[in-house]
Image: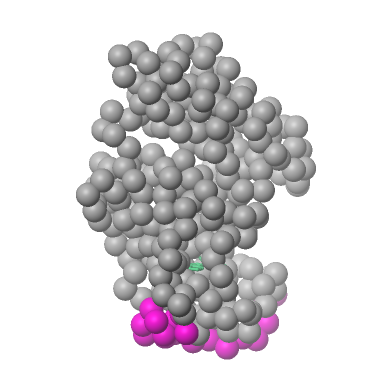
Amino acid sequence: MKAAPFEYVRPPTVDGAVAALRPGAAVLAGGQSLVPLLNTRARRPEVVVDVSRLPLAGVERDGAALVLGALTRLRAAETSPVVRAALPLLADALTRVGHVSVRNRGTVGGSVAHADPAAELPAVFLASDAVFTARGPAGTRTIDARDFFLGPHRTALAPDELLVAIRVPLPPPTARHGLAELSRRPGDLAVVGVFTSLVVTDGVITDARVAVAGAAPTPIRAHAAESLLRGGTPTPDVLAEAARAAAAETDPADDVHAPAAYRRDMTAVVALRALHRAVTR
Ligand code: FAD
């Protein structure tokens, strides 16, 4: 099948791109999700606004935060020494996104804006309390990750807003991350993925972040699991209890890939693996 006819524009500036956005428009970044949707006519935009050459790519440390331009290619972020040193959870999660060919084209902002509930980066940014910067006709605004993801492929971005940057507060150097996924095949979106970051001080867990992908309409923070972990000791029993709590917090649906009950049960298994990796790192 071929895409339905659409107008194609490639404004040379960010402001020009924002001016071209309106209901019925689609942003084209790396095209890894949009182009298949166009070709299957699942999306029929009136106009495609190509932003891929705008100067919104790059990764930098800004004090105690990591700032990623929305158009940073996934592979560039994955191989960035800055990302690896500052936010290894993100660097590791990036290696799980599709295949290298997908990551060579796909962008960090595209992954966030596409808001697939099973995608890695939305869950990592949720776990990390990231803040997204959007540019619209009225100027720039920021949106906390916890307010950004509204449902499968639905975000707080308005139709005339462009995601321009992602700011991630950095965890302390003593933080240890762990992630685990269950996928049907390597490179597939995960059935369930769990992304954790723990700080253990003198044998006590002083900070815990647990985010789950693939087990609810959006990525979720497993707050009950985090509460169980904080103040506890990282023993196998505590980790297992937290993993069960994370599973209880999910809200999965039946789909062609897995029944809801399976996703929930597997969340406990995958969360335990992720937590174990964090405490043994
Ligand atoms: P595009 O495809 O260009 O756009 C995607 C959507 O986001 C569109 O709706 C577009 O309008 C919107 N958009 C893009 N950029 C912006 C912006 N700056 N502001 C506002 N809206 C914007 N993803 C995973 O997470 N995990 C996987 O395992 C995985 N496996 C994949 C395997 C294959 C074979 C393929 C083709 C894709 C896979 N993906 C996976 C999806 C892929 O990672 C994402 O589609 C990609 O990262 C999206 O980025 P993009 O730049 O290509 O976005």
Q: Residue at x 43, y 13 (%)?
A: 233
Of 170 and 152, nearer the camera is 170
Q: Percent x, y for residue 196?
A: 46, 33
Query: How far across and down, in percent of the image, does residue 117 sit?
Result: 61, 49
Q: Is residue 17 magenta?
A: yes
Quarter of the figure that contains the N terminus: bottom right
Give the position of the C terminus as an image quadrant: top left
Span of residues in magenta: 1-19
- The residue closer to the viewer here, 148 or 184, is 148
Nearer to us in this view, 256 or 201: 201
Residue 190 visible to the viewer: no
Q: Position of residue 175 (x, y in %)?
A: 33, 30
Q: Can residue 129 be seen by looking at this rendering?
A: yes
Apparent side of residue 255 relative to residue 226 in the rendered image (left or right): right
Instruction: Indicate the position of residue 41 as horizontal and vertical percent values.
Output: 70, 73
Q: Is residue 156 magenta?
A: no
Question: Splitting the image into 4 quarters, where does residue 103 fall?
Answer: bottom left
Residue 91, compared with residue 208, is above or below; it is: below
Residue found at x 32% / y 37%: 171
Q: Quadrant of residue 72?
A: bottom left
Residue depicted at 44% across the width and 29% down the height: 208
Q: Does residue 105 lie above or below 138 as drawn?
A: above
Q: How many numbered circles does the render carry?
A: 0
Figure check: 178 above or below 98: above
Q: Residue at x 53, y 86 (%)?
A: 8
Residue 172 located left or right of residue 41: left
